[in-house]
Image: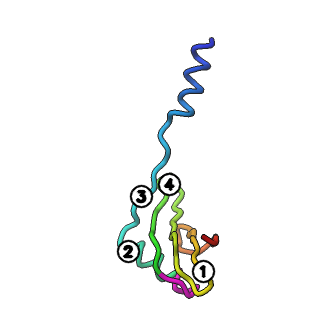
């Protein structure tokens, strides 16, 4: 029983973390358009690989500072955090 518990706990800690994917050129263009509507530009772009459809624009430059944007699969911004 202890061996089974050890294996289960080890599997939790050793399981690979989800990595983000690179968005397509078309997705990048839509991300840029969405952040431009906020008066911002630049940054790096990622697409979450978990199948959630969430897109990220990190280190985006805005007049009031640098921010990270999270967009849904329809390219609507749902979260902005100051970097």
Mark 4 and mark 3: Cα distance apart in space? 10 Å
* Label 4 close to label 2 by CB (< 8 Å): no
From which residue to which does the magenta span run? 35-41
Q: Is residue 20 left or right of residue 63?
A: left
* Label 1 close to label 3 by CB (< 8 Å): no
**In terms of secondary structure, where does tag 3 sit?**
loop
Mark 4 and mark 1: Cα distance apart in space? 30 Å
Q: Residues within 10 Å of mark 2 (few under 14, many from 20)?
A: few
Mark 2 and mark 3: Cα distance apart in space? 14 Å
Provide the residue designation for mark 1.
Answer: 65
Question: Residue 62 at what x, y percent from top left?
Answer: 56, 83
Mark 1 and mark 3: Cα distance apart in space? 26 Å
**In terms of secondary structure, where does tag 1 sit?**
strand
**Image mark for residue 21:** 3
Question: Residue 16 at what x, y percent from top left?
Answer: 47, 40
Magenta region, main secondary structure: loop
**In terms of secondary structure, where does tag 4 sit?**
loop
* Label 4 close to label 3 by CB (< 8 Å): no
Provide the residue designation for mark 2.
Answer: 26
Q: Residues within 10 Å of mark 3 (few under 14, many from 20)?
A: few
Mark 2 and mark 1: Cα distance apart in space? 26 Å
């Amino acid at each position: 029983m202890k061996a089974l518990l050890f294996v289960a706990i080890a599997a939790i800690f050793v399981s690979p973390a989800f990595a983000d994917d690179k968005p397509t050129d078309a997705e990048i263009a839509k991300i840029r358009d969405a952040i431009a509507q906020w008066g911002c530009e630049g940054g790096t772009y990622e697409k979450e690989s978990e199948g959630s459809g969430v897109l990220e624009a990190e280190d985006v430059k805005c007049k009031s500072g640098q921010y990270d944007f999270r967009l849904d699969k329809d390219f609507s911004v749902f979260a902005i955090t100051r970097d």
